[in-house]
Structures are given as C-alpha cells and as structure tokens.
Image (spheres, rainbow, N blue to C red):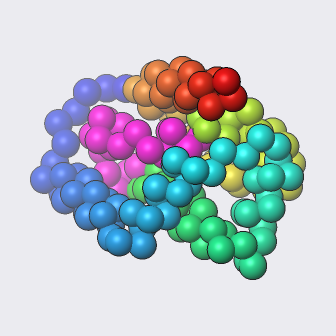
C-alpha cells in the first residue's frame, strides 16, 4: 500500500467511528461479542446470529454490521485505508475469532464479514494486522479451552 498522508476529513471519519463505538448500547454489545461470544460450531453461531428471539442477536448484528460498514467506508475511498488499519483492530479481531467457522458460516451467509475480508486482499497492511491479531485470538481460544 502506498503511504499517503491522511486528510483532516479522514481523521474526522476515524474520530466519528470511535465516538459511535462509545455509545452505551454499542459498548455493551461489543463487550459481549468480543468477550463472551465464542461459539465452537456454526450451529452455535447461528443459534444467536439467526435467532431474533435470542437476547444477544441484536448485539451481534449491531457489532458485525458496524465493522462491515466501517470496512466499506475504506473500500469505497471515504477514509484512508492506512489510517483505518492503524486505528482499528476490532473488525479484524472478529474475523479472526470466527475464522475456524468461516467456511461453514459463509455456506449459509456468503456475505458474512466480506468487506473486512476484502480489506485484506486489497491492502497489505490490513492483512498484516489481521495475521498478528489472528495469532493472539488463536492463543486466547486455546487458553479458553484449557
């Protein structure tokens, strides 16, 4: 990825994304999705993701769609890819967290985390950030099973 200086408009988008993440319900949703939701199978994943009666369904959808929207902003040129990758890791964390289930998830939902995945194919810095996060997620998953 060619290094370019971000603009003040890019900075405003990044700051707005941060501000949105601090909203009370979004914080609760992120805390649950990041910290507590560790499905072992695609069936466990879909029991939440496809079940509007599950109390965590809305939280999951809010967090997943937030990070996909943020990735789409980058892919469509609304914000500097380099600044985004440097400032945001949670979307990559979610992709890494669900990586063992990704093929099974995408059999039913081909678009799941597609924009975040596309970031990695288009921007080497995003792929590098993902790979580093993936190692940490795999270590965390292993620690949870011990």
* Magenta stretch contains residue 79: yes
Residue furthest bottom in the image? 53
Instruction: Name the magenta segment's main secondary structure.
Output: helix
Tally the marks: 0
Residue 62 coordinates in the image, percent (x, y): 53, 67
User: Magenta stretch?
Assistant: 74-95
- Decide if residue 134 is in sight here: no
Residue furthest left in the image? 8
Q: Quadrant of the N terminus?
A: top left
Residue drawn at (46%, 55%) of the image: 31
Residue drawn at (50%, 39%) of the image: 92
Residue 66 coordinates in the image, percent (x, y): 48, 62
| Whether residue 24 is situated above or below residue 38 in the rendered picture | below
Front-lying residue, 73 or 137: 137
Q: Quadrant of the C terminus?
A: top right
Residue 117 coordinates in the image, percent (x, y): 59, 40
Front-lying residue, 46 or 9: 46
Front-lying residue, 38 or 46: 38
- Decide if residue 55 is in sight here: yes
């Amino acid at each position: 990825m060619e290094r370019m200086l971000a603009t003040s408009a890019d900075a405003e988008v990044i700051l707005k994304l941060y501000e949105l993440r601090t909203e009370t319900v979004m914080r609760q949703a992120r805390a649950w999705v990041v910290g507590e939701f560790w499905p072992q199978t695609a069936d466990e994943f879909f029991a939440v993701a496809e079940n509007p009666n599950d109390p965590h369904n809305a939280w999951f959808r809010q967090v997943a769609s937030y990070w996909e929207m943020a990735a789409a902003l980058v892919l469509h040129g609304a914000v500097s890819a380099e600044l985004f990758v440097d400032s945001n890791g949670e979307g990559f964390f979610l992709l890494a967290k669900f990586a063992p289930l990704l093929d099974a998830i995408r059999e039913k939902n081909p678009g799941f985390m597609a924009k975040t995945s596309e970031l990695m194919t288009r921007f080497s810095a995003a792929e590098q950030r993902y790979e580093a996060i993936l190692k940490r997620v795999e270590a965390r998953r292993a620690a949870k099973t011990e």
